[in-house]
Amino acid sequence: MSIVARILALSLLALGMFIYPQEVLSSALGGLTLWWRFVLPALLPFFILSELLMAAGFVHFLGILLESFMRPFFRLPGKASFVVAMGYTSGFPMGAVLTARLRQAGEITREEGERLLAFTNNPSPGFMFGAVASGMLGKPTLGIILSSSVYLANLMVGFLFRFYCVTPGSQQPMRFPSFKRAWQEMKTAQTRDNRPFGQILGDAIRQSTTTVLMVAGFMAFFAVILRLLNIWHITLFLAILSHSVIRIVQVPVFQAFFNGLFEMTLGCQETIQALSLLHQQVALLALLMGWGGLSVFAQVAGLISGTDLRFSSFVVARALHAIFALGLSQLFLRFAKVPTSSFFPLQAPSTTTLWWNTWHLSSLVFIGIMSLLLVLALIRQPLR
């Protein structure tokens, strides 16, 4: 973007914020409320945990044990398995945070970092089950279909990206997993980081809090931008323009789609209102959650700005993820039996309940993914 265009865009944004202060306040509050209820409990505990585990050398431990699985399937080192597990556990933007950390530490190459970044970013399980399936759709069982579609589509993207930027002779030799060698590698990593535990814990909490607050700022800022775009009828104009080309799709559906391209949550909310058939709702929801929204794009761009990782590959991966998630959701929905009534109470749960459910789901996902990766690695190459 040129300097003139940037100044013009910022001037229009400032003008809109001065003209519509009440709308700006309410939209920013809505973004922060979403962050407080779903993002903070899914991110902060696992941000701190990831910092502590990395300082303890756990990443190096996994690097030895899971090398035999990660190399042939994703053309990534075993250390990347930790990013996969944490990214799928906590959702945006955990994958980008940890990928940038590994790249800055020189643990992965530039191409490996871009492959890893491509498939370790998705909504948190708490958001898919709690906010979308239970809250918006009123059918908690649909969370299984949505999350399965999103996770499996992301793995498909990761497998495709194993062919990304492959040069002759770049394939590194694969070594057998060894618990003894993994333990020694972890101890060596602990020796290199000679900080006392109190300092490690303090640094972990400080850095994690800073990152989570940055995410809150992005969510509030993009909620304001999207609100102004709707007030100025820009998304409506894009929807009408698209409808004139593709007449089969109605204007409200296009408007929900464009809102979701900017901000995933608002797009998901409008999808429920714009579409009446369940399979259409699930299709657009899966598409938008696979895409993530420009708010997530901005978070990832900011997090990798201190590295040499290219952002273009991330955009391509998100487009593929959205298409794959849409297709898989329709395939799963075709064979799944979705109850017409819910076995769960549909009244709004308390904040404490939401926090516990989000943290609980994320914990189960983390344990399940780590266990699955270890089993697959051991099946492929038994421990020596």
Image (cartoon, helix red, strand yellow):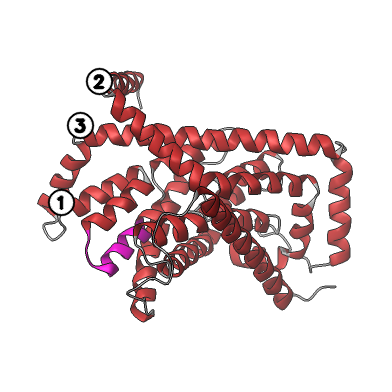
The answer to whether any part of residue 174 appears in the image is no
Residue 238: image quadrant is top left
Can you give x and y, in whole percent of width and height, for residue 261 in the image? Answer: 33, 46
Q: Secondary structure at mark 3?
A: loop
Judge the density around disc 1: few (<14), some (14-19), many (≥20) Cα neighbours within 10 Å.
many
Relative to 152, 211 lies left or right = right
Q: Which residue is mark 1?
A: 251
Q: Nearer the viewer's eye, disc 3 or disc 2? A: 2
Disc on res. 232: 3
Residue 278: say if magenta: yes
Can you give x and y, in whole percent of width and height, for residue 220 in the image? Answer: 42, 34
Residue 217, placed above or below residue 337? above
Q: Nearer the viewer's eye, disc 2 or disc 1? A: 2
Relative to 214, 345 lies left or right = left
Label 3 with label 1: CB-CB less than 8 Å: no
The answer to whether any part of residue 277 appears in the image is yes
Q: Magenta span covers which residues?
A: 275-287
- N-terminal of the pair, mark 2 or mark 1, is 2
User: What residue is at 39 percent from the left and 32 percent from the top?
Assistant: 28
Cα distance in 3D space between marks 2 and 1: 27 Å
User: What residue is at 25 percent from the left and 34 percent from the top?
Assistant: 229
Relative to 125, 102 lies left or right = right
Judge the density around disc 3: few (<14), some (14-19), many (≥20) Cα neighbours within 10 Å.
few
The N terminus lies in quadrant: top left
Disc on res. 45: none
Q: Which residue is mark 2?
A: 19
Residue 55: say if magenta: no
Can you give x and y, in whole percent of width and height, for residue 107 in the image? Answer: 71, 47
Q: Secondary structure at mark 1?
A: helix
